[in-house]
Image: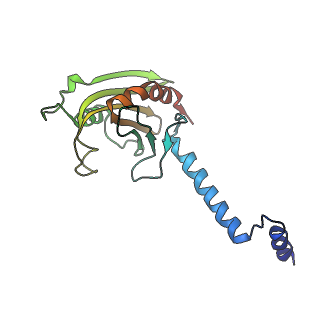
Amino acid sequence: MVRRVVVDTLRSGPQAVTLPRMNRLLGVLVVAVAVVAHAEDAGGLTWTAPADWAVQGARPMRAATYKIPATKGDTEGAELAVFYFGQGQGGAVDANVKRWVGQFQTADGKPIPQDKAKTKSEKLNGMPLTTVDVKGTYTGGGPMMGPSTPKPGFRLLGAIVEGAQGAVFFKLTGPEKTVAASEKSFRKLLESVKKQ
């Protein structure tokens, strides 16, 4: 009797809502909330991404992925990938910086020398932060990602935040102009990183 009253109430009026439809809508809402909540926290840290950076769906090994719109003159946008592998996982900071720089080549196909990348270590919100800035021909995402087409004129801004539950890796890659236009927003995102 109670169930029939609820169903009849939901079906009254021009905007009738059936229980199966409501369940589907609630399911979509739960998934959307889970994606948004997951997209801005990992490893005991939270951060706030710029509003114009589009949150992408879940991907293997990533805590979050953001698409950054292309700047005028660039044919593609940039991407910020956020990785968290667990406490004590993901490798040493220096090894990751070296690997990221190793994903770039000079115009003649030679590896970018490590000393040509700008690296900096500092404290941010009480946590160690290491940043890297490198440009050239981007050759790909690493050994787990498989081969990719080399992309000349690319730039990487990387950051490794060492939290209590392990390191969180922020890797922004894309065309030089788009990355340059996103540099202040990337820094603002890093400054928003806090312990949960």
Q: Residue furthest front?
A: 73
Residue plotted at (42% across, 32% down): 162
- Seen in the picture, residue 25 relative to 126 is either above or below; the reply is below
Residue drawn at x 48%, y 28% is 185
Q: Examine the image and state in which quarter residue 70 appears.
A: top left
Percent x, y of residue 93:
32, 33
**In this view, 146 is above or below 119:** below
Percent of width and height locating residue 10? 81, 68
Question: Observer-nearest residue: 157 or 123?
Answer: 157
Q: In what quadrant of the picture does the C terminus appear? A: top right
User: Quadrant of residue 186 in the image?
Assistant: top left
| Residue depicted at x 55% and y 36% | 51
Picture colour scheme: rainbow
Q: Nearer the viewer, residue 85 or 153?
A: 153
Q: Position of residue 38 (x, y in %)?
A: 53, 47
Residue at horizontal 40 percent and vertical 46 percent from the top: 85
Quadrant of the drawing holding the N terminus: bottom right
The residue sitting at the bottom extreme is 1
107 vs 78, left or right, is: left
Classify 84 as above or below 47. below
Using residue 131 as the reference point, say whether residue 30 is left or right of it: right
Q: Quadrant of residue 157?
A: top left
| Left or right of residue 105, residue 81 in this image | right
